[in-house]
Image: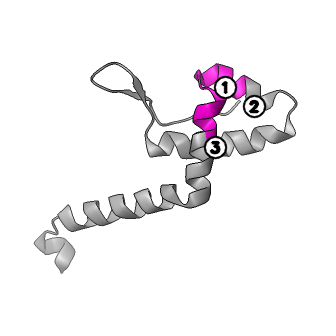
Amino acid sequence: MVSISVEVGRTPSGQRSYPLGFKVEFLQLWDAAMLERGGRARLLREYGLSRATVRGWLHSRDRGDFEASMVSAALKSKGSRRVDAQERA
């Protein structure tokens, strides 16, 4: 069994918050579980997720929202990174 390396966070109100990395890794497991009878139901139980939640993530992935989020985050972090003299040389 492969586990997800990204931790689930919590909002200030205590609800679970799933980072993009968790969603991507979970959906990779979801796609692979298609080959195993009952594999998807097992994943839902193991991670405490509903089908509706996963369905929303699947729609977001299919629309390209995940890629757009990753590009946006990369551009933000790239602009804020300072380069020292040694790196510049």
Residue appearing at x 18%, y 81% in the figure: 89
Left of 81 or right of it: where is 44? right
Q: Neighbour class for label 1 at 10 Å: few (<14), some, many (≥20)?
A: some
Which SS does the magenta portion mostly show? helix
Residue 68 image offset from top left, x and y in percent: 44, 62
Element at badge 1? helix
Observer-nearest residue: 50 or 73?
Answer: 50
Q: How many circles with numbers are drawn on the protein?
A: 3
| Disc on the earlier residue, 3 or 1 | 3
| Quarter of image, res 10 | top left
Element at badge 2? helix
Mark linked to residue 40: 2
| Quarter of image, res 37 | top right
- Magenta range: 42-55
Q: Is mark 2 in CB contact (under 8 Å) with mark 1?
A: yes
Q: CA distance from mark 3 to mark 1?
A: 11 Å
User: What residue did someone put label 3 on?
Assistant: 27
Q: CA distance from mark 2 to mark 3?
A: 10 Å
Mark linked to residue 44: 1
- Under mark 2, the amino acid is Arg
Q: Is residue 68 above or below residue 49?
A: below
Tell me the quadrant of the picture where the N terminus can be found: top right
Q: Is residue 11 above or below residue 73?
A: above
Left of 81 or right of it: where is 6? right
| Quarter of image, res 4 | top right
Q: CA distance from mark 2 to mark 1?
A: 6 Å
Residue appearing at x 59%, y 21% in the figure: 48
Residue appearing at x 62%, y 47% in the figure: 58
Residue appearing at x 59%, y 25% in the figure: 49
Q: Is mark 2 in CB contact (under 8 Å) with mark 3?
A: no
Observer-nearest residue: 2 or 48?
Answer: 48
